[in-house]
């Protein structure tokens, strides 16, 4: 019985809910993602810090998610500002990952610069 309770508790702790994708990306859209937008000459930079629980670590999936989040946030910011930006080359996005084995959370950080179209 104790084993069944432990397995059930573990399964419930592993559950997550999807982020609200109907609105632009902000701190409240996904509680696992934190964004920083700063002005730079000719555009702005976007940094995302993202982490999520992963019982089985999948760093490659997290890298894809992190790149996608930083790119999407850049395009949302450009739309908010009423300006178009140059396409963001995925090769210019800087990404790193890490893992907290105690909490079973994998984290990534991504940084990209967005330049306004002339």
Image (cartoon, helix red, strand yellow):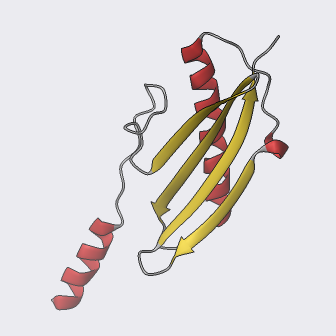
Image quarter hosting the N terminus: bottom left
Residue located 56% across and 72% down the image: 99
Horizontally, residue 19 falls left or right of residue 11, namely right
Q: Position of residue 113 (x, y in %)?
A: 73, 35
Q: Position of residue 19 (x, y in %)?
A: 41, 41
Horizontally, residue 113 falls left or right of residue 47, namely right
In which quadrant of the rendered view does residue 5 lie? bottom left
Query: Is 117 drawn above or below residue 114 in the view shown?
Result: above
User: Which residue, as the protein is rendered here, is positioned at the far front?
Assistant: 41
Residue located 24% across and 74% down the image: 9
Does residue 57 appear in the picture of this structure?
A: no
Image quarter hosting the C terminus: top right
In which quadrant of the rendered view does residue 89 lie? top right
Residue located 68% across and 61% down the image: 96
Horizontally, residue 117 falls left or right of residue 4, namely right
Does residue 114 appear in the picture of this structure?
A: yes
Q: Nearer the viewer, residue 21 or 77?
A: 77
Q: How many badges with numbers are in the image? A: 0
Q: Position of residue 115 (x, y in %)?
A: 77, 24
User: Which residue, as the protein is rendered here, is positioned at the far left?
Assistant: 1
In which quadrant of the rendered view does residue 103 lie? bottom left
Q: Position of residue 49 (x, y in %)?
A: 54, 52
Query: Is 67 drawn above or below residue 41 in the view shown?
Result: below
């Amino acid at each position: 019985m104790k084993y069944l309770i432990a397995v059930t508790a573990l399964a419930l702790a592993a559950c997550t809910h999807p982020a609200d994708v109907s609105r632009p990306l902000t701190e409240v859209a996904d509680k696992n993602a934190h964004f920083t937008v700063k002005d730079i000459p000719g555009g702005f930079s976007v940094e995302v810090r993202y982490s999520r629980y992963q019982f089985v670590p999948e760093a490659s999936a997290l890298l894809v998610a992190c790149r996608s989040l930083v790119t999407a946030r850049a395009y949302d910011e450009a739309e908010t500002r009423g300006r178009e930006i140059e396409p963001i080359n995925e090769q210019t996005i800087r990404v790193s990952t890490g893992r907290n084995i105690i909490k079973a959370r994998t984290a990534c950080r991504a940084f990209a610069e967005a330049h306004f179209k002339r």
